Amino acid sequence: MDREPNNPVIEMRKVCKAFAKPSGEPLAVLADIDLSLPEGEILGLLGRSGSGKSTLLRIAGGLVRPTSGEVLYRGQPLSEPAEGIAVVFQSFALFPWLTVLENVEAGLDALGLAHDEARRRAMSAIDLIGLDGFQSAYPRELSGGMRQRVGFARAIVIEPVLLLMDEPFSALDVLTAETLRTDFLDLWIERQLPTKSVLLVTHNIEEAVMMCDRILVLSTNPGRIAAEIPVPLAHPRNRLDGEFHSIVDEFYSILTSRTTESIGAQRKIHGGLAQPLPPVTTNRLAGFIEALASPPYQGRAELATIAGTLALDIGELFPIAEALHILEFAELQEGAIKLTAAGRVFAQSGTEERKRLFSEHLLQFVPLAAHIHHVLTEREGHLAPIVRFESELEDHLNPSDTEKTLRAVIGWGRYAELFTYDGETRTFSARNGSAT
Amino acid sequence: MEQHAEVLIGRPWHQRVPTWRDAVATLLMVAVVILLGSGARQMIAPFVTAQQPAISLSPAALPVYAIRTTLRMLAALAASLIFTFIYATPAAKSRRAETVLIPLLDVLQSVPVLGYLSFTVVFFVSLFPGTALGPELAAIFAIFTAQAWNMAFSFYQSLITIPADLDEASRGFRFSGWQRFWRLEVPFAMPGLIWNMMMSMSGGWFFVVASEAISVGSIQMTLPGIGSYVALAIQQRDLAAVGWAIVAMTITILIYDQLLFRPLVAWADKFRFEQTAAIVVPRSWVLDLFRGARFLRFLVEPAGLAVQAGLRARLALPRKPRWLPVFALSRRAADFAWFAFLLACLAYVGWKLVQFAEPVLSWADVTIAVSNGVLTLLRVVVLITLATVVWVPIGVGVGLRPKLAEKVQPIAQFLAAFPANLLFPVAVFLIVKYALDPRIWLSPLMILGTQWYILFNVIAGASAFPTDFREAASSFRIRGWRWWRQVMLPGIFPYYVTGAITASGGAWNASIVSEAVNWGPTKLNGSGLGAYIAQMTEAGDYPRIALGVAVMSVFVITMNRLLWRPLYAFAQRRTRLD
């Protein structure tokens, strides 16, 4: 298949997307996205959850309309799903009532092909993707890896010009994901696919560096293109390669500096009250601190390394790191994380001491927790409905971040024994014996 | 038609030789077609209200009656299915249609079906004068109104809960509306729809029996069927004939369960949305038979392929041409116009109703109807409580013993499907014989048929109760009352509420036939709203029938809103672990 590097398959100009807040005001999810995806390229979109990367992919597929800006698919404005664009979903999105063969054929329904022609194309896609012998199986009889192969077969059967992949490997275990990635790359490099370009959304840095020719890093709230990094490595790429490693490290330092910058910026707004908090359980925080305090790290680790040993992807690692940075138990700096003095003490202490320390840090460094605590002590009855804090937060955050932030502060507050929360009545109460 | 891929992609033909399975399957198919066909032919026979076919009380006549009754049921079920697709689809897709259709459905569901039978009979008889089609359609319509609403609700619920990823996948494939409907929406809704069809069918038997022999004022209508057979038996005080009817009904229900629903449930297993393999796969010998009958399948394959091709065709509406002026109205303005229109309609209907009721109804009538309603409400509450006290412990006991549950569950479901009104004569006979007070002893009839919903839902809840919870409870030595209060009752609560909602709705409806019953010339009147509606129907007093029905609807809706819905929401919230 010919791939003409000067022909953009999809272009976006000043694309913005906003959703309506409950109050009716718009809340920006994506802002000023400019991108161009030429033929022959695998473009990666890397970002944390909430960076709008999945929304961006859906805009490219015509599934979601941008609030403003222009999307061009092969030079024509795109306003709804177009012929030649196929999506591979994180959750596979297979029809459970159709067999593998019927699922693949379903992709062809809209083309109105003759029955025989449809069957021939479906069979050849199944063959290409390595599903031979599974035609008559139902998705629920298949393993996750096999299901995603059906997802791929269903996408390539329509011979897409543009293939959109929304975290296609993240629901799979490590080994299966690796096999599928390699198989896909082989087909791509050997040009067995009719596809001209690929847009890959991921939060796995190594996966992005492994597969993409160019990677865009999205920032959060709202999502903007924060950095653009080319990956000039030849396929097949090797994870142990020095160059591979230095690109991965570069990502970690970009992401850490963005995280610390954004934490710093949030602290200045509204007294830090609307600081979005990552909903990480205290068990995870404690476990991470312990791992970081013990050998071989002795209190300092490269994020790329510790992510590997603890088997965490950035979607898991960064929330932990961010929480520890906010609570000042650790400090993020240029792709590395380092325990603070308090962090070291925490690692050495017993349960009671840890709770006391955690509660001190919570009051001192998380203005929202201090605020809730203050309201509860002031009030008679020591009760406060969550709605009150919800509405305060929603002035600054989107509903999903508000929910996460409150979930985080509830978990942390409970652990610190500062306050407790009753999910039934949706109220906070001061921690004075009325524990549920 | 179920298509196995390997057959279609060109495997050898050697299996396509007729086998014994083909013979049996063909026989079965032909028999069903002939039986139903002969019944259908009689439906359009001439019919004169004055000289109706005589009903014979001979047991030999019962098979034919059973077929005709079943045919009405199936016709109504087909009508309900079509209604479901047509009504629920716009309700799920258009926000504005939803604001009208869903509350309307909610009300329709709460209106006692038997109450407005009188109106529809008159309507259909005048629509097709001189043929049996009029009364037949009236009966079918009565069954339809007992079946359609919950099916439509279930379909609507499924449509609005379609998973986002499947929705995006379908849009990504650029399915047309038609393709999306058959590829995504109908399959996704299938398990809920089939379950509700079974529930509807069970409910329908009750009404088919009540609607075959009906007299509204001067119009007397008798359609050959099990219902009119029983009506005649009651008139002639023939207890043996009632016994025969019960036997015939039992056999009919067992047959349609084997021939229709079991195969349907076994076939629909593939539409389950959960991605895990099922532990217990529903089976049906009929489905196995037809799946095994390869020669027969080979013969009908072209038809199957044609149907599939039809469902997969695009059939898209032509797009709106660009040159057409866009009638642009802001969303807010359009909403405003829509609601103004609705309000106007509502005001008009309300005004018409007042005009209709004012000359004949007084506030005294309303007071009488409402006080009767209170009496019936009292009965429903007491009976549901009694049924709960009896069936919850028994249901839990059965549900926790899988072997026993396997045997009891089908019996409970059968009892729920059995039209309890066939048993009324037996009860009346006893009341008359022992000279009991009808106001008390007629009451249990209301719940005779619907109490089983509580039983089988509780059994289902107890069977589904996680084993590890039970083991945890026993390892902490939680026993006695504490075990019930903290372990078991919360575990079965959502199931119980589901059963109790159905049971109470059914009891209201049943009150119309159970609060006033006859045994030959003996009339027993238990008073209550049901008896009120029944009396007014007999007298042909339309304004008061309407009043009774309206009051009952208000009672049912209020009870649903104030009691069942909050309970249901509470059960959903409280017993979720995630």
Image (cartoon, coloured by chain):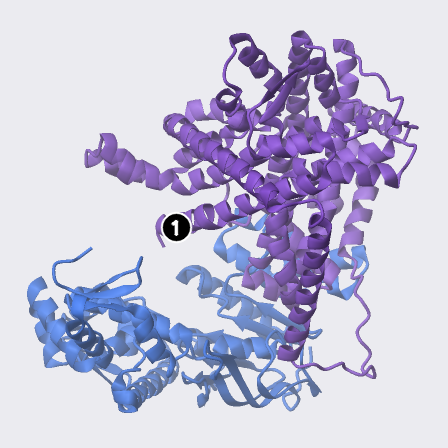
- Viewer-closest of B477 and B98: B98
Q: Is residue B209 above or below residue B340?
A: above
The chain letter corresponding to blue is A
Using residue A402 as the reference point, say whether residue B19 is left or right of it.
Answer: right
Q: Is residue B267 above or below residue A395?
A: above
Image quarter of the N terminus of chain B: top right
| SS category of the residue bearing label 1 | helix
For the residue pair B292 and B129, the one nearer the viewer reads as B129
Disc 1 crowd, CA 10 A, few/some/many (<14, 14-19, 20+)? some
Residue name at image x 81 percent, y 41 percent: B123
Q: Quadrant of residue A330?
A: bottom left
Q: Is residue A278 visible?
A: no
Total number of numbered discs in the rendering: 1
Residue B430 sits in which quadrant?
A: top right
> Where is residue A142 shown, x and y percent of the image?
53, 50
Vertical position of residue A265 compared to residue A342: above or below: below
Give the residue displayed 31% in from the left and 84% down from the top.
Answer: A259
Q: Which residue type does callout 1 highlight?
A: Phe
Where's residue B302, x and y in %? 83, 43
Quadrant for the C terminus of chain B in the image: bottom left
Write down which chain is painted purple.
B
Residue A184: image location, x then y, percent: 55, 68
Query: Which residue is at a point 67% across and 76% down the rendered structure image?
Result: B334
Q: Nearer the viewer, residue B24 or A214?
A: B24
For the question of whether residue A174 can be seen, the reply is: yes
Chain of residue at mark 1: B
Q: Provide the residue designation for mark 1.
A: B570
**x and y, in percent, of residue B50 in the image:** 89, 24
